[in-house]
Amino acid sequence: MSHSLPHAADAERSVSLPPPKSSPPEQVFVNPLKPAELQVLRAQYEKEGEYVGVQTKFNFAWGLIKSNLRTEQQEGVRLLSDIFRTSPERRRECLYYLALGHYKLGVYSEARKYNDLLLEKEPENLQADQLRGLIDDKVTKEGLMGVAILSGVAVVAGVIGSILFKGVARNR
């Protein structure tokens, strides 16, 4: 099982590919762990119980972030956030996966925050640089969609206002 950083393009494919017809409508990740691999990480995490080690927690969170299931991705982000908060010596390791997890969940402001922190520490980090581009693209696309929706609402409101105004003017 490889612990190298995934490329941001894998995350982008995970968000843009439609799920297979037989799967639930959660986002699809191109390279999730096999269920048996994730189960090994889960079993180790559960076996350590309340005395779970930071490395075990990190490994399990890493596997969850790679998952196809949104609930598992959320749990991975929660575990990494806990490590980030309680283990200052492990923060750098958490930054990319927190950014990636938030990106996959569509929480782009948090993804950008963690990714920017990583790029401050490692300006030459190619994966973080790729992820920054993906985050920026998503924010731009969603911003444009928001503008289009607001424009449509404004047009509809204008038409309704015009109709109401004409109706009031006629009744005078």
Image: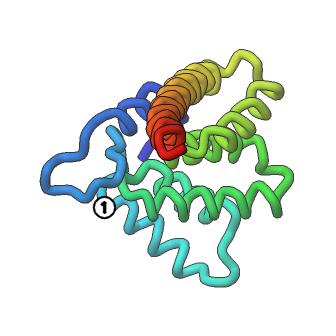
Question: In which quadrant is the C terminus drawn?
Answer: top right
Residue under the point 36% across and 47% down? 27
Residue under the point 75% across and 32% down? 118
Q: Position of residue 24 (x, y in %)?
A: 25, 59
Which residue is disc 1 drawn over? Answer: 35
Q: Please state which amino acid type lies under the numbered disc 1.
A: Pro
Residue under the point 44% across and 38% down? 163
Q: Is residue 36 visible?
A: yes
Residue under the point 63% across and 63% down? 79
| Horizontal side of residue 18 vs 53, given as left or right | left
| Horizontal side of residue 1 vs 125, given as left or right | left
Frontmost residue, 47 versus 137: 137
Q: Position of residue 143 (x, y in %)?
A: 57, 28
Secondary structure category for the residue under label 1: helix
Frontmost residue, 156 versus 57: 156
Q: Position of residue 32 (x, y in %)?
A: 36, 47
Q: Position of residue 70 (x, y in %)?
A: 43, 57
Number of numbered discs overlaid on the protein picture: 1
